[in-house]
Amino acid sequence: MSKKVRRIGVMTSGGDSPGMNAAIRAVVRTCAYYHTECVGFYRGYQGMINNEYVPLNARSVRNIINQGGTILQSARSKQFMTEEGRSRAAENLKKAEVDAMILIGGDGTFRGGLALSQEHDIPVIGVPGTIDNDINGTHYAIGYDTALNTVVEAIDKIRDTASSHNRLFFVEVMGRDAGFIALNSGIGAGAEEILIPEEDLGVERLLDSLERSRRAGKTSSIVVVSEGDKTGKNVFELADYVKKNLPYYDARVTVLGHIQRGGRPTCFDRVLASRLSVKAVELLLDGKKNLMVGMMNNEIESCSLDQALKGKHNINKDLLRISEILST
Amino acid sequence: MSKKVRRIGVMTSGGDSPGMNAAIRAVVRTCAYYHTECVGFYRGYQGMINNEYVPLNARSVRNIINQGGTILQSARSKQFMTEEGRSRAAENLKKAEVDAMILIGGDGTFRGGLALSQEHDIPVIGVPGTIDNDINGTHYAIGYDTALNTVVEAIDKIRDTASSHNRLFFVEVMGRDAGFIALNSGIGAGAEEILIPEEDLGVERLLDSLERSRRAGKTSSIVVVSEGDKTGKNVFELADYVKKNLPYYDARVTVLGHIQRGGRPTCFDRVLASRLSVKAVELLLDGKKNLMVGMMNNEIESCSLDQALKGKHNINKDLLRISEILST
Amino acid sequence: MSKKVRRIGVMTSGGDSPGMNAAIRAVVRTCAYYHTECVGFYRGYQGMINNEYVPLNARSVRNIINQGGTILQSARSKQFMTEEGRSRAAENLKKAEVDAMILIGGDGTFRGGLALSQEHDIPVIGVPGTIDNDINGTHYAIGYDTALNTVVEAIDKIRDTASSHNRLFFVEVMGRDAGFIALNSGIGAGAEEILIPEEDLGVERLLDSLERSRRAGKTSSIVVVSEGDKTGKNVFELADYVKKNLPYYDARVTVLGHIQRGGRPTCFDRVLASRLSVKAVELLLDGKKNLMVGMMNNEIESCSLDQALKGKHNINKDLLRISEILST
Amino acid sequence: MSKKVRRIGVMTSGGDSPGMNAAIRAVVRTCAYYHTECVGFYRGYQGMINNEYVPLNARSVRNIINQGGTILQSARSKQFMTEEGRSRAAENLKKAEVDAMILIGGDGTFRGGLALSQEHDIPVIGVPGTIDNDINGTHYAIGYDTALNTVVEAIDKIRDTASSHNRLFFVEVMGRDAGFIALNSGIGAGAEEILIPEEDLGVERLLDSLERSRRAGKTSSIVVVSEGDKTGKNVFELADYVKKNLPYYDARVTVLGHIQRGGRPTCFDRVLASRLSVKAVELLLDGKKNLMVGMMNNEIESCSLDQALKGKHNINKDLLRISEILST
């Protein structure tokens, strides 16, 4: 039988995403509601190794639900990838009388958590937070909806100037391995073409499509490109290639970059973060461990961390079809 | 066997919601993609009665995906509630050679459409667009996500001044019969209390909770109130009642009003509107009729208009629990 | 000769306005730059009376430049309006070894500061912060530019729904005694009519103008109304009056309320707050007192508090003319 | 004596800026108010050469006051730089019975206008619209205030992630020859360092300052860099140089790019555009020519185009001092 959980630790790890603070707040308040202590570790696993933590109560998380970033800060810890690092972290947890951990982050975070749990028998629950949305076991990860809106607002602005100048814009968005951001923001922004890692449409198809657009009288265009697209060209090379082959296009490039990680979380991300985190605390208090909470079909569910790490969250291929129809 | 659909009409009816333009755009472009003609009727059923319509092509809907409101305008038509009104509308549709209609709106819109279809054998497909989100057969109606964000951003602003002045704010949000906006925006904005039509918590419970908050050292608070809440007091009476019973609270009222209907649609609403509308056109071209398209469990589905009108889309009661835990 | 200033106190008083935090930050950092101590009093004069203050250093004001509200909170203190209250405040200042005060607020704040200074010989400098912008001696008060943008964004949203439904909207904005917000936001939002305290155009003129608009084919309209307009009718009575006399108008009312006080400050307000506050500290260190800093003709200037309180900051009448021309 | 002006042409030229539509609207409505005809030329001087224009009335400019970009589109015309090009444009103006032109743009636009006026005796008035704000004769050009807010909002987002990860971010903003955007947005965003074309602080000074920051315990930093900064290194080289010399810094780069040109204009830019454009029309109707309108010391003034082109709008050096004090 598992030991009663009296003190829960929480941390954020990996790339930060908007809504992580809403998640921390919900963990802390749910602990308070169930008269359970809560401490926060700084900078993810590194803070566990360095024994940097702080007790958290309802007041510590006042007015953070709408703040981007994470008050606990985040990091990627190389030391934690070693057995020695994890042992040190586990020791510190024991000294701090932390009975279980809630880990907010992406798959790197969960992989670390699983190792910690298996090697040192520390119950952990993962809460998926990543703008890339590429985690199996949840339809939505915290921060993804906010990132989509940040991207769409940025492309709205770019379209103003694209339309005014008859220009073709290549906009690079985040997503090294997954096209979630590109595909959804591209449809939302009314992009003429969308290039994602999951599907190589080929550069020639892009030329054909732009040529067709121009013949149909379209004078400005937006092409959304995932960081990890499969054309074999980066976004600047793509623009050059198009300029060379379709010289009537005045092609420009914008790389949206790190603005995609920040900003006030949307209502969706705040509610999602709140619901997932309440569930995470309740699972621990219920004696469960090594699970990831997720939102599947509008309900909060959980799956084993194993399963979350093994599977792959695939994009909805129907969206590619939608994109093609709408860029008519 | 149903007649081949060669020309599709589209209109928006009832209260407008952000994303209706994205829906119109998607209807028009999907028609173009399938080489089907498309016309738009102005001001909902009234435009059908007055025979006010315009041919729409891909260019007519350029750069509207991110605009609030509806380029076809909207209205509530009393005339259409009479058989005579509907006959006149049907006649005009026949003269205009419109084979089928896509109706973007809420349940009033769908009720009208069902009558039209039954009395005059005109295939119709409903696309749910209403910030209230109270339509059965879809987890999300177009405009709801945008309205949530508008409300949350407004309450963020109010919280700035509430915190600075130790004030208690009552914020009235839309939702005469349904608490979707209040409940989700309340959780998203970190409201201390949420009053919705679906559940009468009673005024005394509110007093208790505020008293408890004050004792816990909370000096400012936000109470989100649905238009249709069940306390039997409107938001101004509520504030007065609290002031009389808890005189240490400096209670203020803000009625958010019509700003909730406008604004640029979020990415979510644009993608939702696009997906629903592509499906609506494809259903008509496929010989289907009298259905409503909806998003259930992240997939685009359809149900009969009958079913959409008979059932009720209930709020997720678990959110009430979440709200209570988090306002600890 | 004035005593050397070694420790400066800062506080915010009266209605809060966006940018007050940027002002506090700049006071604190300028003190640090000049190796001068700084303490912050909570809740304006009330904190001085209650002796509630906190030492502030560069780190205390980290990441607040973009936050609405005021970390020092604000209040209106009745006790400070008595000689006894002010004596107590002065005593506390002396005990705390505060040599001079920087007062961020509006004319009520400055009146109190002048009394404190005259009765107890405490050097004070006023920094104008009020969304109403009605302070003499500065073209811009901190928070005004942000409030204008909040109002204009709200009216943009209302116009979406006004246009979609052919409606007439009356939008009440803040400004009990001054029409700055109404006049500038009205022009910025393209309002058809603007009613301000400084000029009574009369209700009949409004009817004439709306009637003319309708005849010219305008089907939706926005009328911006200052809280303190001079028609003798409040905004709801105005709407009723118009509905009775021009029944073809579907008139609605929105009272924007307290959202106007909150929100992230604009770049203009952040830079303004920064410049004014650096100057305020430098004046005190330079042995000056009982002045208000202000921005006149794009330069930072100062005038005596007396002058700031005696004069009146008038609206630019030419804007009324502009408004009339543009609502053609 | 100058010929009576019966028909006014308007166009936008050069890089677009938010608020140009508000300016077009004000030109058109002021013409309507004074019973003067108005036509709009597309794509700046190129449209004059190609004889592409459209009559504009109050309805043509409905609901554009809040739209980014320009409905008349913009371009840079090489042909117009030749005498032949200008002759053709002048001929077309005469055929179209356009008596005078209003030119919305930057100094390239005004240079072209002056040549046209001198060679072909066509009265022109310039309206300054450029986000760079580097036009002599006006304290503010249309679009500059909006661009500042776009930049500050983007840096707010970047700071979220910078703070969460202890990172140093280099943010490149527009301004090839002028540091207005960098200097004001840098102060508004609380940047630790600001590099502008007007002042070469040297790379070594940047290293010193960052080293000092780190010693003072600052763990994340923002450096705002103008496109045209004078270090001799571009923003990527700067980041590399810092990484090499201060290896404890995890330096990243974001190039904000074209999002700075788009977006809904702020209230300030809408009012500015409205006031400048009313004045421009009134000057033409008053028989004036070859002037630029501008806002000097909060009042609308005018100066000769010559003067606007000869002088230089200098940044306020005091802001550099402010920036240094506040990054303490």
Image: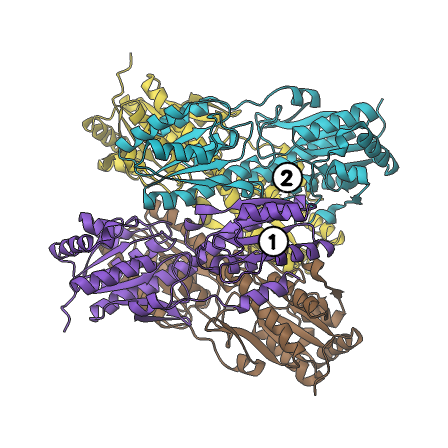
Chain colours: A brown, B purple, C cyan, D yellow
Q: Looking at this view, name the residue that lies furthest to the top.
A: D1
Q: Is residue C84 left or right of residue B101?
A: right
Q: Residues within 10 Å of mark 1 (few under 14, many from 20)?
A: many
The front one of A72 and B234 is B234
**Chain bearing mark 2:** C
Between marks 1 and 2, how big is the CA–CA gap?
25 Å
- Identified at 32% across, 16% down, the residue is D287
Q: Which residue is mark 2?
A: C16
Q: Would you identify the image quadrant in which residue C165 lies?
A: top left
Q: Is residue D260 above or below residue D253?
A: above
Q: Note whether residue D224 is visible.
A: no
Left or right: residue C98 versus residue A163 is right
The one nearer the camera, C238 or A50, is C238
- Secondary structure at numbered mark 2: loop
Q: Is residue B39 left or right of residue D316?
A: left
Q: Secondary structure at mark 1?
A: helix
Name the mark on residue D28: none
| Count of labels in the image | 2
- For badge 1, the amino acid type reads Arg
The quadrant of the image that shows the N terminus of chain B is: bottom left
Q: Quadrant of residue B39?
A: bottom left
Q: Are marks 1 and 2 on the same chain?
A: no
Residue D296 picture location, percent across and down = 50, 25
- In this view, D194 is above or below B94: above
Q: For mark 2, does the 10 Å Cα neighbourhood hold few (<14), some (14 to 19), or many (20 or more) residues?
A: many
Q: Chain of mark 1?
A: D
Image position, residue A316 (x, y; %): 39, 72
Closer to the camera in the image, B217 or D195 = B217
Residue in the foreground of this view, choosing between D312 and B134: B134
Image quadrant where one finds the C terminus of chain B: bottom right
Q: Quadrant of residue D201?
A: top right
* The label number, if any, that marks residue D159 in the structure image: 1
